[in-house]
Image: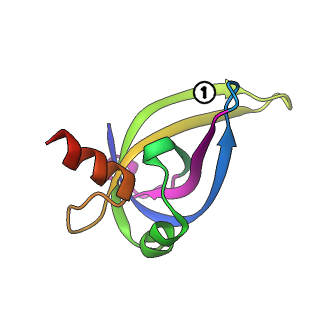
Amino acid sequence: MQMQGRILVGSVREFRTRKGETLPKSSIKVVDMGAECGSDVVTYWIDFLGDSAVTQAELDDIVGTECTVDIRFCRSSLGKDGKAYQNVAGGAITNASGQVVQSRLRTRQKKAS
């Protein structure tokens, strides 16, 4: 699934797996700009792990811009506080010129070609 949206803010950090490996992780807040939203303002926090994670420089470049975000999976969960939460994981982020923002994904695409 793809979402058209404007990147509002984000954070970049490292994530430690249960196996002890360290993966890059970025969380980005996106306001949905697609036609399905109508006039409602809907925002999502989307997590990007591994090759899909953006660097701080890439995040700085896309904040405030409209992009297309590939959504890999989306599910709801019940938090410890009893509230429902939406968990969304993203893949490639494509900027307005049609280029993938994440340098790790671009490198992997070139190797696959």
Local crowd size for mark 1, using a 10 Å CA cut-off: few (<14), some (14–19), many (≥20): few
Number of numbered discs = 1
Q: Which quarter of the image is occupied by the N terminus?
A: top left
Q: Could you tell me residue 34's position as x and y percent? A: 33, 53
Query: Is residue 113 magenta-colored?
Result: no
Pick out the residue farthest to the right.
81
Q: Amino acid at mark 1?
A: Ser
The reply to whether residue 85 is in sight is yes
Q: Could you tell me residue 71's position as x and y percent? A: 40, 39
Residue occupied by mark 1: 76
In the rendered structure, which segment of residues is drawn in magenta?
A: 21-43
Pick out the residue farthest to the left.
113
Q: Could you tell me residue 75's position as x and y percent? A: 54, 27
Q: Could you tell me residue 10's position as x and y percent? A: 59, 62
The reply to whether residue 102 is in sight is no
The relative height of residue 45 versus residue 66 in the rendered view (above or below) is above
Front in this rendered view, residue 113 or 100: 113
Front in this rendered view, residue 91 or 78: 91
The relative height of residue 28 versus residue 90 in the rendered view (above or below) is below
Q: Is residue 30 left or right of residue 109?
A: right
The structure residue drawn at horizontal position 59% and vertical position 52%, both measured from the top left corner, is 27
